[in-house]
Image (spheres, rainbow, N blue to C red):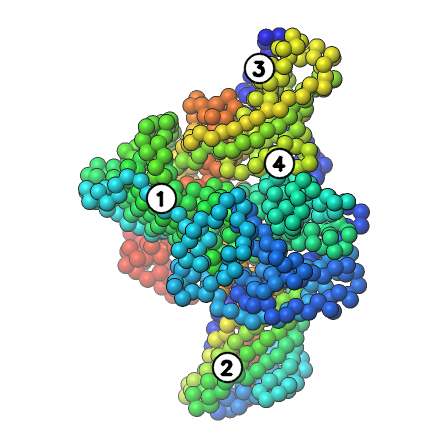
Amino acid sequence: MKLSHTALVRAPRSRVWKLVTDVPAAARCVPGVAAVTPSGTGKYKGSLLVQLGPVRLVLDGDVALTATDEAAGKASVRADAKDSRLGGTVRATMDLALVDKGEDTELRITSDVRIAGRIGEFGQPVIQRKADQLMTQFAECLARTLA
Amino acid sequence: MTLAKSTLPDILETPEWRVEGRDKVTGAARYAADITRPGMLHAAFVGSPFPHARVASVDVEAARKMPGVRAVLTGADVRPARFGRRLQDWPVLAWDRVRFIGDRVAAVAADTVEAAERAAAAIAVEYEELPAVFDPEAALAPDAPVLHPDAAEYTYLGGTRPPRSHANMQGHVVHEHGDVTAGFEAAAAVFEHEFVVPRVHQAYIEPRASLVWIEGDTVHVVTTNKAPFALRDQMAVTIGVPAAKIVVDTPHVGGDFGGKGLSLDEFALYFLARATGRPVRSVLRYADELQLSNTRHAARIRLRTAVDPNGRITAHQGRVVFDGGAYAAGKPVAGLLPGGPTLTLAGYRVPAARVEAVAVYTNTLPAGHARAPSQPQHTFAAESHLDLIAHAMQIDPVELRVRNAIRAGETDVEGNVWHDSQAQRVIATLLAASQWGGTVGLDHGRGVAFSARHVGRGKTSLTLTLAADGSLEVLTGVADQGGGAHTMIQRVVARELGVDVARVHVRRGDTGHANVDPGVGGSRVTPVAGNAAVDAARKLKARLGELVLTLDDAARTAAPLAVTGEGEQNEHVFGTYAYSVEVSVDRATGCFRVVDAVLVADVGTVINPVAVRGQLEGGFVFGLGQAVMEELRLDDGRVTTTNLGDYKIPTIADAPSLRLVLITDAPGPGPFGAKSAGELANPAVGAAIANAIDAAVGARVMSLPITAEKVRAELAKREGYAPTSPDGTADSTAGRR
């Protein structure tokens, strides 16, 4: 499933770059993330709690910064997670691009998300809505943190 | 003849009561998932998250130690067991390679469903992803990844697998008759169009369920499979147990619509039952039904037709590409294509034709049979194509069909000569019933679609026993999948013997007790099992004649008296039918509504009047769902419509009124002149609606399902304005005329 999100962060690009490429710091802006710990160069372990209607998913997994190009303002993140209670895996590849917008920065995130097993059965509208919600809150949090 | 002439009214004139009706409405009827055994375990499976991957390792240690777990099996434990209805290409559990998302790699048997599922979730599988292919045309490229490199090992049941020119082909067939080149050269006009039909699910209410146990050296199977004898024979090959040592029992089936001829779980359950010594059951969740089972094939259909100046077809070419999914296991026919793969212009005279059909492996869930295999795809294409031809040649669409509909003695698109045809009568009846040519309201339009479906062929037998109490018992292997088969048999026997229907009891037997039957399907039950019922009744009458006894005297003095009735139907006979559908279309939104529908169907003699109506009305609504709302959507091989909220099927609120006109006086080869009805109505609905929408507002939709969005997009193209953007900024009234 391909998702794309755009958000305007009221801070200069260099500051936004610093924050989004600091995985533990950026992760604090994702609602439901708990305990992100380094597990190697550019690699982290963490867990994300997601509430989908009446269902609570706990996604445990790995996050890795797979590519960074500060000059171009581009970074790639790969996340692999598993929910062992309900059964299912999520694999997401996210490409981040930061674009100068005067004094502000536009954050563009294109994600390719593969969901397998039971948690993939929620139906795309539900997943899309949840992803939109997480992304909006993520961007708002980034803006707050940098304010 | 010693039988008294019946004074009863003709049974066939009286609406029937279903043999199983009381049990079904009171909840007494038992379905496969209702059946339990002492000590029964429950199964759960582990499916692949990748569309194409090598299975590097499967770690079951943690799962084996979990409470309540009795057995955990992987591909290594079942190798080389594969299953399938004709080609056994689907591993019971994958041991080296998975080919679609959900392809199973491990199975668990545990005390409860929950324990089995917890254990399945604890199995760790390592995969190495392989390049996947989702588009059938891409799968036919010379350098496409090969899905089945080990195809030479596969068992093909009943003969030799037909040759293929590409490793990713499941089946490939070319039909040719007449001088196609000359037909095109002599043509006044040639038309070519391409149509797309998506994957759809049969959407029966009851998910697949099965229970397997081993008693002594006999394997017992309770299943939702509608063809128990065929399952027994397939299973014998897959598990290596002689067919005589396998007993398959199919209780009432909660809906089939062509999908329940393929079993998925029974084979793995056998291995689990063998490993544990206990009965093991599996009931599929509906989400798995939508992700694993044999859907109708998606198809891309290109039709090219040559016509003379009067619109008469002189030659026809077709190329049909079916998306077969990861396995061909769901296809029962010899060519490993869905049935009737080259029937691209059903019911028309086609002097010369060349039609090529291919079913292709892709890394998606396997496709198989669904009510009238191939025909909804073909009829949508053919009847849209003919309407486009009529429009271009300025011939009334019904008149074009009159000019081309097949008459007795003429040859159809598959090169078969029809010895009888009611096609002209069906169309003439439709003209009158629908008042074709009359005026319709603003933005209303009418569409017509005509088609044909063969009367089922095959062979079966059943036994009829006269008991001492005077009752008559029929023992049949025909499963009850809801079509009314047992009631049909009861009424045929009662009518032939001139007795009250209440005196005839129909009992279904498992494969250990009943005579061999090919299973419900292919519009076969009434013409084949019905003929066996007639034969049984006639044999009993002959026996009574020899004994010079009446039925009642024989019951008292000679019972039990048993005879075997044989039924066979191999004639190439077609039933034809036609729809007229009226729609109203909202030009601003593309929304449309069916406001009236007329169906004329040539069904021959009616045995079950209520069931015939049910089959035709149900077929219409089934066809309507697939015409305007259903699509099993996939995203990189993963089904995204995994529940009946996302995969929409029609409810009664979606069903418009349908007027039904039956032609019953042209006898067919079934009992008392019956034909078939079960697959007669659904295929032509899509084209009738597409044609009606085009007639209403000039928007031609070339793919199913026909949605408001597609109608709106066609209107926009035609009228040269941009459709409303999702945020609603464009002027939504711009398209109004």
Q: Chain of mark 4?
A: B
Front: mark 2 or 1: 1
Q: Chain of mark 1?
A: B
Residue carrying label 4: B479
Q: Is residue B588 left or right of residue B629?
A: left
Pick the residue in front: B402 or B363.
Answer: B363
Bin the neighbour count of mark 1 within 10 Å (Cα to Cα): few under 14, some 14-19, many 20 and up.
some
Residue carrying label 3: B9
Do the residues at pointers 4 and 2 share their chain? no
The circle on residue B595 is none
User: CA separation, marks 2 and 1?
Assistant: 52 Å
Image quadrant holding the N terminus of chain B, namely top right
Bin the neighbour count of mark 3 within 10 Å (Cα to Cα): few under 14, some 14-19, many 20 and up.
few
| Callout 3 amino acid | Pro
Do the residues at pointers 2 and 1 share their chain? no
Residue pictured at 74% horizontal, 69% vertical? B62
User: CA separation, marks 1 and 3?
Assistant: 49 Å
Whether residue B174 is situated above or below residue B574 in the rendered picture: below
Residue carrying label 2: A76
User: CA separation, marks 4 and 3?
Assistant: 29 Å
